[in-house]
Amino acid sequence: MIEAINKFLDGSTDGMIALQTLLTAIPAISPSSGGEGEDKKARALLGWLKEQGFSDIKQYDVPDDKVPSGVRPNLVVTIPGRESGSVFWLMSHTDIVPPGEMKFWETDPFKATVKDGKIYGRGVEDNQQGLTASAFAALGLIRNGITPKRTVKLLFVADEEVGSDFGIKYLKDHFKLFSSSDLALVPDGGDEKGEQIEIAEKSLLWLKFTVKGKQCHASRPDQGVNAFEAGSYLVMRLTELRRIFPDRNPIFEPDYSTFCPTKQEANVPNINTIPGDDCFYLDCRVLPAVPLKRVLDEISSMMKETEKKYGVSVTVETVQCVESIPTPEDSPLVKALSQAVKDVYGANPHVVGIGGGTVGAFLRNEGVHTAVWSTIEETAHQPNEYCVLKNLVGDAKVMARLMLTL
Ligand SMILES: [Zn+2]
């Protein structure tokens, strides 16, 4: 079975280039980045999928009045498996980021150009490599009359680059697509040897602190309450969170939770006024083993202490809070992926965690074991973005193995 699929994939380079060429010619840029969304590209992809013989394709349109078509389309292609029940998802995104300054491009970003074993163009790596590889992996099974073990679903989502509100976030909130026994591969991140299997993210917490005191002339501090001074004290107290949560996890870099004061809003414009307001932000990236509730409790007691010490009032607002559930290292998904990467690339894969913020977290938080993996040279979002043809074929082989074994 594997031999037949590998033969099909080795002979599919031209077909892969053709799909990349088709998709690259239709920029799918978010309206917030000045584009018209994914509609035209999704239609072209849908046409291609039908032409290839995929028969079960569902489209999930998310309404968006900021694009001419009025919708942001998401596609799900189903290849029924031998065993009913749980699903193996392969999720990639159709949207791209703008090309940036054209003078840095050596080729037309919207015309796929093949040169020295690579395809150049905006989107060819991020995320059309994953998209194309997953489609051809499924074709490898279909063309050889092979039924996957569990049902395979190729998920092509919109809006990944700017927050996923019209993509995976909407799908999980409005359609019951995922179950906690599902497994998912997100081929949208990795390294050039295919050795990194990302299975976890730090939880993300962004907080906005507002300290209120009383403004007065700087010559009469006795008549006011200096919010800046109290805020500065609180900032230093907050950095002690690093000592309070000393946990380590070697799959992350750095291997500890981080708590960083970042942005501070401007206060008074002149030197001789004591500011009555102080407003600053804290960026926390917390190891998944530490519940955010514990972090928030510590922060709350530091705020109370500051209020008491300085006679100010302190409030906190959550700007963003994503508690992360890691995929276990011994998940069948991680084991099968490691083995497939070893077999196809002869590489030595290892699991990693990252500082937070990929679409993998949305699936993990639905209870779906999710690995982010691909073999890429990380040219995403750069001028002269490229996809290495050898990796495109190799990644398709890895995905086909997963379809057979999971
Ligand atoms: Zn991407």
Image (tube, helix red, strand yellow):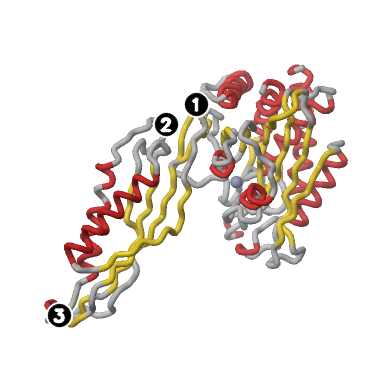
Q: In which quarter of the image is residue 364?
A: top right
Q: Which residue is drawn at 38% across and 39% down?
A: 290
Q: What element carries label 3?
A: helix
Q: Which of 61 and 309 is in front in this view?
A: 309
Residue 23 appears in the picture as rendered: yes
Query: What kind of residue is marked 3?
Result: Gln
Q: Which of 268 and 123 is in front in this view?
A: 268
N-term mark: 1 or 2: 2
**How many residues crowd mark 3 within 10 Å: few (<14), some (14–19), many (20+)?**
few
Q: Which mark is residue 223?
A: 3
Q: From the viewer's perspective, is the residue at label 2 or at label 3 nearer? A: 3
Question: Are circles 1 and 2 on residues that touch, CB within 8 Å?
Answer: yes
202 vs 226, left or right, is right
Q: Which residue is drawn at 39% across and 42% down?
A: 291
278 vs 308, left or right, is right
Please tell me whether residue 269 is drawn above or below residue 142 in the rendered image: below
Residue pointed to by mark 1: 329
Query: What kind of residue is marked 1?
Result: Glu
Instruction: Give the Cα distance between marks 1 and 2.
Output: 10 Å
**How many residues crowd mark 1 within 10 Å: few (<14), some (14–19), many (20+)?**
some
Query: What kind of residue is marked 2?
Result: Ile
N-term mark: 2 or 3: 3
Q: Residue at x 63, y 34 (%)?
A: 184
Question: Are circles 2 and 3 on residues that touch, CB within 8 Å?
Answer: no
Residue pointed to by mark 2: 251
